[in-house]
Amino acid sequence: MKKFISFAVVIVMLLTVVACTVAETTDPSENETTDYRYLSLPDTSEEPDDPPPPLPDTTPDETTPPPDETDPPRETDPPQGGNQTPPNQPAVLPTGVSVNQVSVTLDIGAGHTFVATVAPANATNRTVTWTSSNNAVATVNNTGRVTAVAAGTATITARTHNGQTATATVTVMQAGQPQVLPTGITIDRTALTLTATASHLFVPNVAPANATNQTVTWTSSNNSVATVNSAGRVTAVAAGTATITARTHNGHTVTSTLTVRPIPATPAPPTPFPGRTLPPGEVAERYLNFSAACRAAFGAQATERFLYVFDNTWLEIAHYFARNGQPFRVTLIASPNTSGAPGWASGTTTWVRANWMQQRPNDIDILVHEIAHNAQAYGGGRPGFIVEGIAEYVRDRWGMFNQQEGWSLPARPPANASYHPFPGHRESGSFIRFLVSRDPSFAVDINRAAQQSGAFGYNEARMWTYQRTGFTLQQLWNMWVGRPVGDTVLPNLGAANANQAAGGGTVVSGAQFIRGGTGMPNEGPQNLFNTNANSKFVARVDGTNNNFWVEWRYDTAIVPDRFIFSTANDTAGFGRRMGNGWRILGSNDGTNWTTLHTGTANDSGTDVNNRFFYVNLTTTQAFTHFRLEAPNSTSGVEMTGAILIQLAWVGISTRP
């Protein structure tokens, strides 16, 4: 009996051990919910006494208020993203970050949570910080939870620890306000060709104009060819083709086909003239008409040198600067004039004064300058700094006798000089050379732009340059002459400039004209954004004509300190004649406007010097778009029975 009891006890003990073993190896997920956020590699030295308790689900949704951000983090909470790289492993830096939505529309008081994804997935530190561009419109906490505060728009930015960013736009509406959905979108260019390193700012137009959410997102089909930022600025990277797509928040799209050309190689200078008689080469034989009479008028030495220079330069000059990149026959004529310009060009003919060559036998590269004009073949009205500047740059680049002649481009002009009006031949050439140092294809491409049909004046050159470089012509000129980049001197307007009106603030550069009212012939609203006081915006404001209005934008939002404007050049103090109720407004989408200042009749704010005026703007909100408008009025200047308002320039200043 004792043996039977002992045997039974042994059996019971074995069953107990087996049962315990099975219990210990059972998958806990079969019996309870495990929070895997708190699982980690076990410490093999000893087992923990108890597993960490599971936490309640704190995933935010549209009905759950965000957690109190002032609560201190618990020691058990891992940092967002987490650093999960084992010790002694090399750090993997984030290469990018994206958010799950690029735009949302919320009612005041509503919330929304954005989710950020850091790339690559194995990045060592995937921490993301969140910021709002306008906390008065929408705030965001450290988990990406946005709360709508007031009507308007705000940009929410997710940023990795090493500076990679992604953005989303939040549009906040009054509760119950009906939402107008976009029905389509267009852009200013559906096909575009750029040289590598060049850029262009696309201008989108969302329809209808009163669409509630006018957010546009931009993508490139091939970032190795061209990239595009959130503002629609495309930058050419390398030769190839890419499709740029603009998309509304509800899925309407429009595309532009971008072709990127490689930067043209700049040929090496030709071999210096060896000082011996050379027969005409093949290039001169094929492409230069040079009569015996002209050769006799120039003399043997000048003739030989002309032939040599033409033979060594014409193919390159025609390749880069002729309309189709192909050489053509040029006629060289010895002018009998004894005074005036030493050389000039028209069509396919170049003239050089014979007596000039007798007086200056080493000035052979005057031919290089003039055949550059033959290649340019511009229409009328091109800015002098482009026409003569490119020709002087070509002479400096390809000329072969400049050193013997003692000819060179100046290092820089006086600090008070301006690119307009025309600063002079060599000063213009030196400016073009400076621009080429920043953008190797600048001279070639602006020459192509000036060769296109239609007007290409100072305003077009300014806008073209800004689209290419991100700087206005004035800013680039300031860089070259050594002035502060933001110094916007306006020629012909007296000693004062816009910086005086800024009163210690900074005049914001990069204003981009969008649209405006109907001005008088050749005096449209686009003239407000060049630096030529002789071009102005003149419009009627009487009767049923309400044409004095203009909108412009900047790439980044700014908090305006002052609205500054300049009168036209006709009459000092002309700016005091503004219409009753004229206004300056700000916006971030070009549709929803906030009034920043309303003026009374003939009120132009503070007079700086009878040319520049300013008004203080007390807002603390940042804007990308601005609008100036003057309603129908009996106030203004009376001309031929019409009530007119005219200005020469407008701008915004800001303070740190």
Image: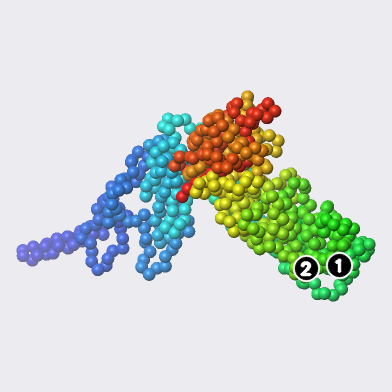
Q: Which residue is nearer to you in this view: 589 or 603?
A: 603
Label 2 to label 1, Cα distance in Å? 13 Å
Residue 365 seen from this side: yes
Residue 112 seen from this side: no
Crowding at label 2, few (<14), some or many (≥20) Cα neighbours within 10 Å? some
Between marks 2 and 1 in the image, the one whose residue lies nearer the viewer: 2
Percent x, y of residue 628: 56, 36
Exactly how many numbered labels are in the figure? 2
Name the residue: 54% across, 33% down.
603
Q: Earlier in the sequence, mark 2 or mark 1?
A: 1
Q: Is residue 157 left or right of residue 646?
A: left
Percent x, y of residue 79: 34, 56
Numbered disc 1: secondary structure: helix
Quadrant of the rendering where the N terminus is positioned = bottom left
The quarter holding residue 292 reads bottom right
Q: Which residue is nearer to you in this view: 419 or 443?
A: 419
Name the residue: 27% across, 54% down.
74
Q: Is residue 591 left or right of residue 41?
A: right
Percent x, y of residue 491: 64, 48
The quarter holding residue 64 reads top left
Instruction: Report the residue marked by disc 2.
Output: 405
Q: What's the amino acid at mark 1? A: Ala
Q: From the viewer's perspective, is residue 275 above or below residue 313?
A: below
Crowding at label 1, few (<14), some or many (≥20) Cα neighbours within 10 Å? many
Instruction: Report the residue marked by disc 1.
Output: 302
